[in-house]
Image: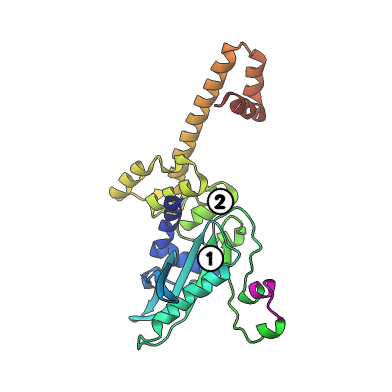
Amino acid sequence: MAEKDILEKILITHNDVFADCENALAYGGRKRIKAEDIYPAPTESFYSTKDKVHSQFEDVSAYLMERGEIKLQFLIGNETALEGRQVLRKASYQGGAYRAQLESGRPAYPVIGMVIDWTRKGTRIPLSLHELLKREGASDEDLERVDDVKLEVYHMNNLSAEVRARFVSDMGFVVDYLNEGSFENRRNQKIVHVEALCEMMEALTGDMRFTEHIGELLKKQEDRKEIAMCEYIDLLEARGESKGENRLAELIQALLKEKKFSEIEAAAGNREKRHELYAQYGI
């Protein structure tokens, strides 16, 4: 599970992808952030409990720099299991980032956090601190004295076509596939981060086909050849067809041994019947 989580995070750590995610999601498609202005920021912050100091790690953190000064810090949580108290986690991470500014002597800057959710399930977690506290018994009177914290969660498996169209980096391939099961709308788009994209697709889908051609694709990049998504699609489809043909051949052999000729005919002409027999014969 830890390795899967790491693979899901690698693509977004590339500056162009990080900036693209912020622009497409947080800024509604406006090109607020440029990749060349993004710099790595600490993902570790600290908090104390009684006699002990603890560290906490956010998944991805980056500074927006302008003319050598920090203008913003972005925190992104990559989640595959949202917690009911996720908003407290956000408040803790942002608090740690602000705490680091307290005695820095430099101008203070905003810390902006959001959560990217990779699960296929909807969620009803509280999206603000007030909502969480009210759910757990706080009165309206008391909440009037409490600063609120808003939680922004983007469900990558449930993005509209309009939102997906805002992505211009390799992340566009990911969100299109998760929502449509296809890369077709980006056939002519160039792949920039081949290895990170392939590994993330395998981590998210469990389909090992996505990483089988990494070596071949990297060799093309080493030879300074651009790789359009249509080439990758062709490789995936060829692998899928080959696998499908082998699977059907194995099923037919099993049915021939049992002289189930009517089943062979049914499998050849009916996809649902074919998959029913695959399951029955463990193919």
Location of residue 2 in the rendering, given as x and y in whole percent from the top left corner:
43, 53
Closest to the camera, between mark 2 and mark 1, is 1
Q: Which residues are magenta?
A: 132-139
Q: Residues within 10 Å of mark 1 (few under 14, many from 20)?
A: many
Q: What amino acid type is highlighted by mark number 2?
A: Leu
Does dot 1 land on a helix, a strand or a loop? strand
Disc with the residue nearer the chain's start (2 vs 1): 1
Tell me what residue is drawn at x 43 percent, y 76 percent. Answer: 48
Query: What residue does disc 1 label?
Result: 115
Residue at horizontal 52%, vertical 71%? 90
Q: Mark 2 — residue?
A: 178
Classify 10 Å Cα crowding around label 2: few (below 14), some (14-19), many (20 and above): many
Q: Which mark is residue 126?
A: none
User: Which is nearer the eye, 161 or 196?
Assistant: 196
Check the image and report above or below for 63 versus 203. Answer: below
Residue 262 is situated, as x and y percent measured from the top left of the image, at 67, 15
Residue contact at pointers 2 and 1, CB within 8 angstroms: no
| 30 relative position to 7: left or right | right
Q: Residue furthest front?
A: 51
Q: Is residue 267 left or right of residue 80?
A: right
Q: How many marks?
A: 2
Instruction: Point out residue 35 in the picture as x, y percentages from the top left corner.
Output: 39, 68
The residue at the point 64 percent across, 60 percent down is 123
Determine which quarter of the picture holds residue 269: top right
